[in-house]
Image: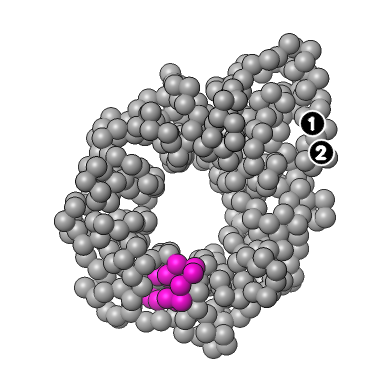
């Protein structure tokens, strides 16, 4: 455990013991009155980098790292942090892997979800702490899908407690939650008949957007949205499809060259781009002029390679994490230019790096198998965020995100 976090928790333990604490992790925000709690962060700062590693969650803002510690050792997550995200209100949520001892009070054999409000609070719905999925709505409302089958459907956190969304219990196994540009909850589920179905929650009820008659009904799907707001899906065997006025079509009526879609999205200029799974050599394709074209560029043939991740910078530069080389490339002036070269496919335990852009437009990566968190400076140098004192220095697989630049009031 990081020394700073250990010190904070030691002080919190003393506070807890003096208070006679002995309860299982709290499931709702308690009334904070101790001076120790007064010093805990309320949530993420606007525009901050928020990251989680194996034992801690912290944000980087104003040139320093700030931890999100527990309010007491008894309410501290005891298993590994896996992912972290931030709501529009600045609330931090993190997922931990399950406890191997399901009989431990407040623990579970499945994943658990924790939210941060001056301390970590375990999400528990009717004493069920197993979480399959969660998502923050545009207004910061938390939606959760329990995991163990005893509580079917989607549950919404309200001021009066957790409420099940009407009709969600009948959706079957829920595979994903997404939000349309208009803020409509969009759900992928698998009903009892085994067909993958996409639903949208409108006017208090779930409306089916697909049926078991669509060509991709037997596929697993990921959801996206075209620049005009139309619903789109990437499938595991039939490429990309778009909902055009209630009719599912392939772009231009042409079959997608990538059947098992790993990622898809539209460039800032509106060009649909698709890649295969990272383990495949399906490469990177774009649809323009009524047909599909493999993305070409001088230098290494990234467009025909294994694609781990792609995206566009704020200035519209296509950026790719290449799964073959475990490096990051940019397509600049028709040439694939290496950007992140601190890792190589020949490294022991080589891992492709993940990347994203900060609210100020800086490229940030988790360093692949090098670990840590790195930012590309205006001079073109990679700088470890927070330097050697970073709580994530050398840690591989750090999950990170950015808080919104401006936060909204909680509902």
| Coloration of the structure image | one colour
Task: Compare residues 62 and 69 and report the one nearer the observer.
Answer: 69
Name the spot of residue 59 as percent of width and height, x first: 68, 44
Residue at x 33%, y 76% (from the top left corner): 257
Residue at horizontal 21%, vertical 65%? Answer: 249
Q: Is residue 258 visible?
A: yes
Q: Is residue 62 left or right of residue 358?
A: right
**Residue at mark 2 to residue at mark 1: CA–CA distance:** 6 Å
Q: Is residue 69 above or below residue 177?
A: above
Task: Give 191 or 269, whichever is nearer the viewer.
Answer: 191
Numbered mark located on residue 8 in the image: 1
Res 170 → quadrant: top left
Rendered residue at 74%/70% (across/down): 381
Whether residue 204 appears in this view of the structure is no
Q: Which residue is mark 2?
A: 4
In the image as oriented, which residue stretches furthest toward the bottom?
298
* Relative side of 46 to 235, left or right: right
Tell me where residue 220 appears, x and y as whole percent.
34, 56
**Badges 2 and 1: C-beta atoms under 8 Å apart?**
yes
Work out whether residue 178 or residue 90 is closer to the camera in this orientation and state it. Answer: 178
Q: Secondary structure at mark 2?
A: helix
Q: Position of residue 286 (x, y in %)?
A: 38, 76
The secondary element bearing badge 1 is classed as helix
Q: Which residues are magenta?
A: 274-286
Which class describes the residues within 10 Å of circle 2: few (<14), some (14-19), or many (20+)? few
Tell whether 55 sits left or right of 111: right
Is residue 276 one of those drawn in magenta? yes
Q: Could you say where residue 319 lies in the image, as x and y percent from the top left?
A: 54, 71
Question: Within 10 angstroms of label 1, few (less than 14), some, or many (20 or more) residues?
Answer: some
Please determine whether, in this image, residue 61 is positioned above or below residue 237. above
- Residue situated in front as seen by the camera: 63 or 93: 93
């Amino acid at each position: 455990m990081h020394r700073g976090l250990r010190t904070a928790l030691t002080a919190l333990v003393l506070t807890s013991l003096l208070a006679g604490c002995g309860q299982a992790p709290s499931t709702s925000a308690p009334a904070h009155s101790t001076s120790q709690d007064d010093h805990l962060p309320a949530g993420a700062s606007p525009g901050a980098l928020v990251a989680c590693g194996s034992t801690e969650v912290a944000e980087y803002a104003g040139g320093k790292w700030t931890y999100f510690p527990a309010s007491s050792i008894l309410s501290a997550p005891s298993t590994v942090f896996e992912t972290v995200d931030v709501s529009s209100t600045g609330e931090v949520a993190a997922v931990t892997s399950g406890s191997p001892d399901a009989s431990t009070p407040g623990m579970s054999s499945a994943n658990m979800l924790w939210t941060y409000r001056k301390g970590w609070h375990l999400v528990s719905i009717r004493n069920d702490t197993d979480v399959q999925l969660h998502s923050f709505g545009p207004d910061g409302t938390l939606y959760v899908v329990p995991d163990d089958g005893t509580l079917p459907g989607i549950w919404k956190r309200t001021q009066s407690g957790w409420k099940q969304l009407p009709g969600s219990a009948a959706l079957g196994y829920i595979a994903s939650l997404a939000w349309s540009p208009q803020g409509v909850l969009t759900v992928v589920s698998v009903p009892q008949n085994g067909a993958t179905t996409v639903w949208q929650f409108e006017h208090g009820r779930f409306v089916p957007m697909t049926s078991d008659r669509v060509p991709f009904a037997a596929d697993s799907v990921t959801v996206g949205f075209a620049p005009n707001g139309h619903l789109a899906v990437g499938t595991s065997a039939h490429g990309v499809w778009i909902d055009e006025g209630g009719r599912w079509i392939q772009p231009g009526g042409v079959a997608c060259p990538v059947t098992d879609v790993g990622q898809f999205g539209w460039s800032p200029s509106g060009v649909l781009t698709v890649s295969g799974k990272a383990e495949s050599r399906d490469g990177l394709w774009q649809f323009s002029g009524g047909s599909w074209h493999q993305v070409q560029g001088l230098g290494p043939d990234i467009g025909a390679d294994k694609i781990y991740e792609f995206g566009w910078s704020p200035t519209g530069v296509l950026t790719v994490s290449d799964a073959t080389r475990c490096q990051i490339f940019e397509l600049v002036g028709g040439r694939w230019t290496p950007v992140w070269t601190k890792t190589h496919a020949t490294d022991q335990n080589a891992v492709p790096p993940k990347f994203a852009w900060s609210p100020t437009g800086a490229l940030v990566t988790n360093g692949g198998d090098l670990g840590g968190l790195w930012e590309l400076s205006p001079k073109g140098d990679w700088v470890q965020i927070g330097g050697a004192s970073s709580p994530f220095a050398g840690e591989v697989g750090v999950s990170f995100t950015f808080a919104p630049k401006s936060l909204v009031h909680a509902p």
